[in-house]
Structures are given as structure tokens and as C-alpha cells.
Amino acid sequence: MHLNQRYTNWMRLSKKLIEKGFNDLTMLATVLIRLYKAELPIIKKAQVTIITDPKEIEEPYEVALKIYEKRDERARSINDEDVDMFYGCVLCQSFAPTHACCITPNRMSLCGSISWFDARAAARVDPKGPLYEVPMGECLNELAGEFEGVNEMIKKRSLGDIERIYLYSGMEYPHTSCGCFEAIDFFIPETGAGHGIIDRNHDGVAINGLPFSAMANQTGGGKQMPGFNGISMQYIISPKYQKYDGIKSGLDSGIHTIVWMGKTVKDRVYEFLPEDLRDKIATEEDAEEPEALVEYLSKVGHPALAMEELF
Amino acid sequence: MALTGMQIYKNLPKTNCKDCGLPTCMAFAMQVAAKQRALTDCPHLSDEAQESLSEASAPPMKLVKIGPDGKQFEFGQETVMFRHEEKFHRHCGIAVRIPAGLSDREAEELVERINGSEFVRVGSTLKVAFSAVEIELDDPAGRAKLVASKSKLPLILIGSDPDKMKAAAEAVSSENPLLYRAEASNLEAMAEVAASVKAPLAVSGANLEELAELTGQAKDKGVSEIVLAFGGRDLAEIIRSLTIARRAALKKQFRVFGYPAMVEVDSETPESETVFAGIFAAKYAGIVLINGQEPWELLPIMVTVQDIYTDPQVPNIVEAKLYEIGNTNENSPVIFTTNFSLTYFSVEGEVERSKVPSYICVVDTEGLGVLNAYAGDKISAEKVVKTLQAQKVAEKVKHRKLIIPGLLPIFRAEIEDTSEWKEVIIGPEKAREIPAFLNKYWT
């Protein structure tokens, strides 16, 4: 089951399976090997080790995290302008038939598991598979991140439902989401041009009174929903993050539109946020309601407060 | 068109007063968008906001009703361009013309024939939807009343003279007939008749631009139930108009086309009339007006409609039980098939035709045919065995022979190994081969 991916992997076994004689994890391992070899024909031999001791798994887990960090670092080293090919992913179309992700160096898949490098590798291994090349085509709007090739791709993959996407905007022609995004960027109208970000791990409601699940319902499902976008955590610290919205509101960049973050989000991205901004972003510890938030932002002098309403 | 949270939010007071029970106006807007709260739950909604929001959330295509309570035909309020997006909601209806040139007796006979034009297919009864009577004769009211008294179906009144239409419409106003039709030259007068009698009005234009204007004018004159009428000999042009009208209504909120459509089929031969009517029925026409009355002319259109207007997400199913076809006894053959209506009725029909009394054990595959069920993991040898057990089939017959669909030969070994049905016979792949098969192998 594809859910929040590189940090979490779920596998559900039905009672019926147990009744039929599944009583040994080596059976699972055998299935895994067969699946991997079937999906990736370049694999000739494979070995599976299953660790069930929580203490024993700590070390390899750290190793995995370090590998992810290195990958992320490498992913951060290149920008959209440096490449001539984007990639698309339709792994989630069984859940959201009109959704496809467009994966760029500055914008990884919103499930947080497929970077531009990963997508490139996967597309090479199986060009007719769920990950595929998206020739960028002409750049129609540099600030918004609108590309002819991306529009064509999404029109085709959504069977005409979606016709254009601004890759760097959450308010105009936003990228669609399926359901497995890591976080949600939501517009907070009371704060002028401000946005908030909440992730799955957040306890309780966001500053707008809605919990993650309620917003996820509106955000997901393959519909273009201005003001509410499913995003990956990586995208938050990308130089292109909602750049169009930020610049259009008269701010320095997209990240400057963020006025509130759930604590779980802020902790994860704090060190990557601009220094002059990160302590002005409120969490639930600083404000619990929009009015209190406006006061707080006014006190710390957050730039977004002074800006016009975007819509 | 569903309103987004943001669109709804724009119309709210934005005070976060919490009187609706939610902490912010944005939260409320999202709930309304998700249809979990009603817009009217906000006690401080301004009148302008209410109006603009309800205008925006009204269905893009009107629902039009023709006929009196008890035999009413409803169409319109369609929501999608393609049935696979959701489904087409209201069946297209066939209207058979009763020409003015017929004598009263001939007209009566025709109405009786139309009344009796019913066919059963795949468990449903297919019928004609309207008696469409031409009223341009000396006594429009008389003809209208005659047809109304005899017809089991709602009426369409066909005429272009507003005075005659008025006479006919007033004579049968309680029938709520469709007035067919208004065009540029008579729109005002026709609209007045429709408004005064409170009947739905079919409106046509020389082109789409004119039609858009005319429906607006009809609406201004007080006609609320409007039908867009198309016709002529240019097949491509009619399809184009039907498509553009629907697309404009559904996708662009173009209210002047926000009505159901109909087509008066005009063709050179009866054969092409049937074919064209079927095409229009599949392509957004809610009523097809034809001259044909013979079963061979009606049935192809009806079957097309029956198929197109099914719900792609909810297949028609029959009850999953043991069916006895003919005078069965303990030596009769046992066949199994799935509970998809089309599958079941195909098999049942052929078994009847074979004149070999048989048992048909229907397995619940959630409405999938044999191959789809197999591919979708909705049928297995195990499930067949369990079904036979649950339906107590072994108590009905002395033998233990089971005839299985020719498309599932792979089940034979497992059924023989895991049940008392020790002689599994692989039947034909196609239902139409069943009679030959049964007569060869079961006598």
C-alpha cells in the first residue's frame, strides 16, 4: 500500500490469507522477490532479510535516513532551468483518476517519495510504466511555471479534465493532488496573503479550525482546488515554492507567504527556512485562532500581513 | 457545477463569528463545498450572497416534466458529457407522430398501436414515450382531445399556427403536453400560449445563435419549461448543435442552453430514420420524434437507449439463486452462470430455446459477466462450489454433472476435486450455442 512511502510502508494481511496457510514471513519475502523481479527485469537475483526486532532495526533505519538525506541534497543541487525533461507519475490514478504528478528538480512528487532523479531512473527502466517522460515544451510563463509540455501531459492523463497547470502556484491553476500528499498548503484569508501548512502528524485542528483530514477531502481527488494544495515536505523548502503567489502579492518569494505552520512541520523544515522569516512563522503554540494569528504576525512584523488579498 | 470552498467563502460575512458552530468562515465554506453543511446554516448570509450562490449552485440543465401526474415524462438535469464520468440520468423517449392527414378512426388505431408497443428485454419493459399528435387541422381541439382520451402516454402537440396551438393546448391543458414548436416567426405568440397554459415549450432556431436568443425571449415571456429542438437533414449539424448546447450548459454555465434537447428526425427512408434516431438518442437528445411505428423501427432505438442509459458503476443484476427453466426434474442438467443481467438473460433465453428443462445456478459476481468476473477475482471454483452448496442444488438432481461456461474451463479440475460434482462438463463459450449443446449432450 502506497502511503507516505519512504518513511512508512504498510502491508495488510487478511484473515483469509492466514486461514489459507500463510504462517511464515519467508513466504512474504518470496512474494517480494517475485514482485521485484517481475517489475524490474534487470534484477537477476535478490535476497530479502526481514528484521522484526525494533532495537535491531534502529541502525539500518538511520542508514536509510542518511541515504535519503544525501539523495535530497543531491536533488536540491539542481533546478528546473537546468534540465530539459520533466517526468510524470500516475501511480495514484486508481485513487484519483484525473490526477498525475509532474515531477521537476524543484518539485518532487507530492507523496514525498519520488524525486526528479528517481523518476528519471524509473522512466528509463520502464518507459511505458507509471513513471514517464514529460518533454517540457515551450515555457509559457516563467514565474508561474507553466510549460506547454506539462499542460499537454495533464490534459492527456486526466482525459481532458485538467487543461493547464501553474507549477509554482497554489492559487491559480494549481497542481492537483491524489490523497497521499505529505502536507497541505492552505490559504488563510484573514491574514491578507498568508498561507498555512499542516501535515498528517499534526494533532487536532489547524489555525483555520479544520483538521488535516477535512482539508484533505477537499484538496485531494484530482481536482484543481485554488487555495488548498497537497504538497511534499521537500517542496516547502524549494526555491520555487509557490513563487508565483508570493511575487504576485508583492513578497520576496513564495515561502514568505507562509504565516503559520503546524509544529510538526516547522520542526522538520526549520533549518532550511530563510533566517529573517523563520521566527515570524507562527505555530499552534503561538496562536490558535485567525484573530490571534493576525495579532501575532503584526507583533513580529511578518511581511505577508501587509500584502493585498490575492483573490 | 460544484462550488469550491473559496468561491463560497467570498460570499460569506468573513467575521468568524462562530454562530454556525464552526470556528471560521473558511471552515464553514469548506463544509458547504463538501455538502456537509447547507449554505443557509450561516445566519448572517446577505441576500445578494444567497442569490449569487444559489444561482451558481442551481443545476446547469433544467428538469422538464411533460404529462400529468401518474404518466409523467421527466428529462433534463443531466450532469455529464460522457456516461463514464457518472451516468446519463434520464432515458431518452421515443415520440411517434400521428399525422394530421389521418382520419379520426385511423388516428385512434394508431394511438392504440402506440400504446401496445411494449417489449421485454433483459428484465425491463421498453415502451414508446409519447403520442405526438399533429394539430394543424380544422379542429385542433377535437383531435387533441381524441388522442388524449385514448393515449396511455403523455402528449406532444405538433403545430406552427399559434391560434391552433392555443385551441389544442387549452383543450388538453390538464395533460401538460409539450407544445412543439416555436421558432423565430412565431415565438412571441407560442410563448404566450405556453405561459398561459403553463405547458412546456419546444424552441428551435435557424442556428445556435438564434436559438440562444429565442430561449431567452421565451423565458422572459414567462415560459420556464423549455426544450431545445433540433431537426433537418444535416446529421452532422444536428450532432454538433446537440453537443455544443450541452457542453455550453454543463461546462460554461450558459443558462440559455440549460435545457434538455430533442430532435425531430427527418430522413429519406424508415431504415435511416431508425438509425438516426438511435444516434441522436446516444448523443444528448432527450426525445426523438419519429414517424415509424413498426416494432422493427422502434426496437433498435429502444435497445440503444436501454444500454446507453445504464449506470456504468452499477451493473444490472439478477438475484443470485437457483433458477428452474421449464419442467425440471431430478435428471435435468445443471448449468452455472453469473448474476449480470445481460449474461443471465442471454443464457436463460437460450436454455428456453433449447426446450431442454434445466437448472441455472446463478453465482453472485456483483454484476460482472463471466470473463470480467474471472479477471476481477469475483468468481472462483471455490465460490462456485460454495454457491452450489448454499443453493442446495445436489438435493434437486440425482446426477452429479455440472455444465460450466466454456470461458472458464480452468475451473473444471478444482470443482471435481473439491466437491461432489465429479463430472464437470465444459459447455460452449457463447450462449447461442447452448441449444445445440444441450440437445447433443443431454438426451
Image (cartoon, coloured by chain):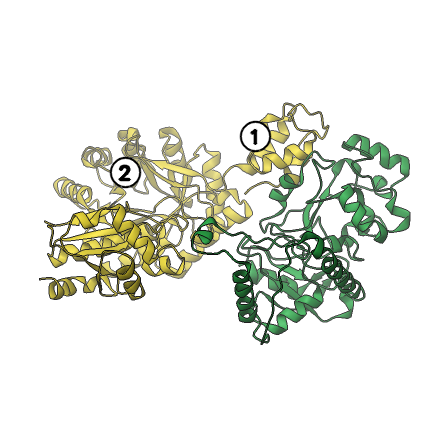
Residue under the image location 68 percent in, 52 percent down: A54
Asked if residue A261 lies left or right of residue B369, the reply is right
Instruction: State the yellow chain.
Output: B
- Ranked by sequence position, the earlier of labels 2 and 1 is 1
Asked if residue B317 lies left or right of residue A293, the reply is left
Image location (x, y in percent) of residue A209: 70, 33
**Circles 2 and 1 in contact, beta carbons < 8 Å:** no
Chain A shade:
green
Q: Quadrant of the C terminus of chain B?
A: bottom left
Image quarter of residue B260: top left
SS for dot 2: strand
Asked if residue A116 lies left or right of residue A20, the reply is right
SS for dot 1: loop
Residue B289 lies, with reference to residue B9, above or below; the image says below
| Residue denoted by label 1 | B38
Front-most of B145 and B42? B42
Quick one: label 1, few (<14), some, or many (20+) residues within 10 Å?
few
Q: Quadrant of the N terminus of chain B?
A: top right
Residue B196 lies, with reference to residue B311, above or below; the image says above
Provide the chain ID for the residue under circle 2: B
Real-space Cα separation, disc 2 to disc 1, in angstroms: 38 Å
Which amino acid type is marked by label 2?
Leu
Which amino acid type is marked by label 1?
Ala
